[in-house]
Image: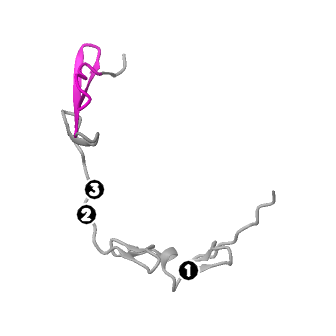
Amino acid sequence: MGVEGSNPFCSTIQSVGCCFSAGSTQLGNLNYSYDADGRRASSEGSVAAVNLPSAVSGNTFNADNGMSAFNGTSLCGACPERSRRDANGNLTGDGANTYTWMRAII
């Protein structure tokens, strides 16, 4: 028997809930409430936990808003001083590797 979801209460458009069960065993619930514009205002229940990733610092961006470093580590493909591109904008080198591109024949 698998996990089943049910929507036992949906009395207004601004409150929606769902219960999850396996047979007669309730596994958890999830409730959403919405504001007057239809945006989710809150989520509650035993399966509503949100685990966000840890914050990072040291991100840098080039003049074209391309990320050139993430968490202090250089991203060579985004570094103009290391990357090389052909006339079509294809990456041909990143300082460590060389790339070749084949023209598609249609």
The answer to whether residue 84 is magenta is no
The answer to whether residue 23 is magenta is yes
Q: Is 94 placed left or right of 45 in the picture?
A: right
| Residue at the image position 25 percent from the left and 63 percent from the top | 55
Q: Quadrant where the N terminus lies? A: top left
Of residues 33 and 92, the one nearer the viewer is: 33
Q: Position of residue 66 (x, y in %)?
A: 45, 73
Q: Is 102 placed left or right of 15 in the picture?
A: right
Image height of 80 relative to 47, above or below: below
Of residues 16 and 89, the one nearer the viewer is: 16
**Mark 3 burial class by Cα count in 10 Å: few <14, some 14-19, many 20+:** few
Which numbered tag is attached to residue 53?
3
**Could you say whether the residue bearing mark 2 is in a helix, strand or loop?**
loop
**Mark 2 burial class by Cα count in 10 Å: few <14, some 14-19, many 20+:** few
Image height of 14 relative to 73, above or below: above
Which three-letter amino acid code belongs to the residue tagged 3? Pro
Q: Position of residue 5 (x, y in %)?
A: 32, 23
The Cα atoms of the two marked residues, 1 and 3, are separated by 30 Å
Range of the magenta residues? Answer: 7-35
The residue at the far front in this view is 36
Q: Which residue is mark 2?
A: 55
**Mark toward the start of the polypeptide (1 vs 2):** 2
Contact? badges 3 and 2 (CB < 8 Å)? yes
**Mark 1 burial class by Cα count in 10 Å: few <14, some 14-19, many 20+:** some
